[in-house]
Image: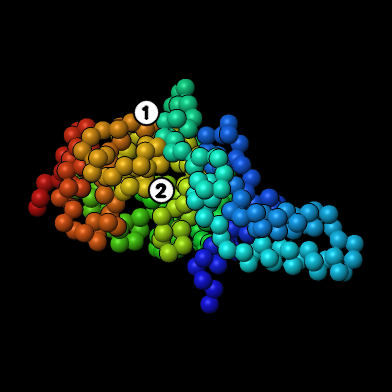
Amino acid sequence: MQSEAGSQARAWVEYFRDMGVYDFYRRGDPASPCAIEIEAGADAATQRATDAAAAFNDPPTSPTEATAARRGLDDVAAAPAPNLASTIDERTSVPPAKLISFDDLAPLPAAAVPAAEREAALRAIQQEIGDCTRCPLAYAGRHKIVFGDGLAAARLMFVGEGPGADEDTQGIPFVGKAGQLLNNMIGAMGLSRAEVYIANIVKCRPPNNRVPEPVEANTCSQFLLRQIDVVRPEAIVALGATAATYLLGVKQPLSSLRGRWHGCRGAKLAVTYHPAFLLRDPRQKAEAWKDLQMVMAELGLTPPARK
């Protein structure tokens, strides 16, 4: 059985092959706010990749050369996946990619999309994403792209980390056990799921529900940013550390981010625990309710009367 590391290495190789890229460790465009700068993980691996690329781009003229070219590509595929973060720190002078808040990724639109046109604007973004192959998650067992769900002109938006198994099957965010809890949280605020908008940092399920890698999250950021700009919510709730990290461009404990307002794309942003975490540690539900009460006060919401 192929190891997880081997599967990830193969996913990376297939991703770059699909994109026609064989210089695997190119630097990103420094002018691009979403650029991730990565360098070679090992000189030998880099040389194998370069040799394989040359053979691929300059077709061999004999069976012997063709065999050598195929072996070059197979060697690259079999090479251990490099640790990109440690590579940058230890092997080059290029610093790790810095987190950038959604406010700094792009200017706010000069004018809001009219409420009547927001649903069509979201569909246009979804169509642009298409059958996305922009990051390695497309090659890591994804079944469906999970775009978003809810009211296109919602006052309140929830942003989670990424799809799980149920979401990957149905193509809708938060439909598993964590989604059922989120629905209950929304209901306790005096709203229905149909009255809010829900999305994730990444739109494809990471293998084994792991945390999205920076290259994956930053690749997807451009689409989530545009979703937020179309919906124009008054308030955003970041569900968990991953959502807070990428929306705000900071990596801090939830304890230091909860209980106060932040800003994101013209909306007020609150941070609370991810429903999946609350399922693992129900003792924190009371703390999450405090966060939601802060949001309710801002939006003028009242919980439904108990029957």
Residue 174 place in picture, x, y as percent: 35, 55
Single out the residue that lies furthest toward the bottom. 1
Q: Quadrant of residue 68?
A: bottom right
Q: Secondary structure at mark 2?
A: strand
| Residue at the image position 76 percent from the left and 66 percent from the top | 70
The relative height of residue 64 versus residue 202 in the rendered view (above or below) is below
Closer to us: 306 or 94: 94
Q: Mark 2 belongs to which amino acid?
A: Asn
Q: Residues within 10 Å of mark 2 (few under 14, many from 20)?
A: many
Q: Which mark is residue 142?
A: none
Q: Whole-percent x and y of residue 275?
A: 28, 54
Where does residue 96 sit, x and y in percent of width and height? 49, 42
How many numbered marks have been drawn onto this rendered protein structure? 2
Q: Is residue 18 left or right of residue 64?
A: left
Which residue in the protein does label 2 denote? 200
Residue at the disc numbered 1? 266
Residue type at numbered disc 1: Gly
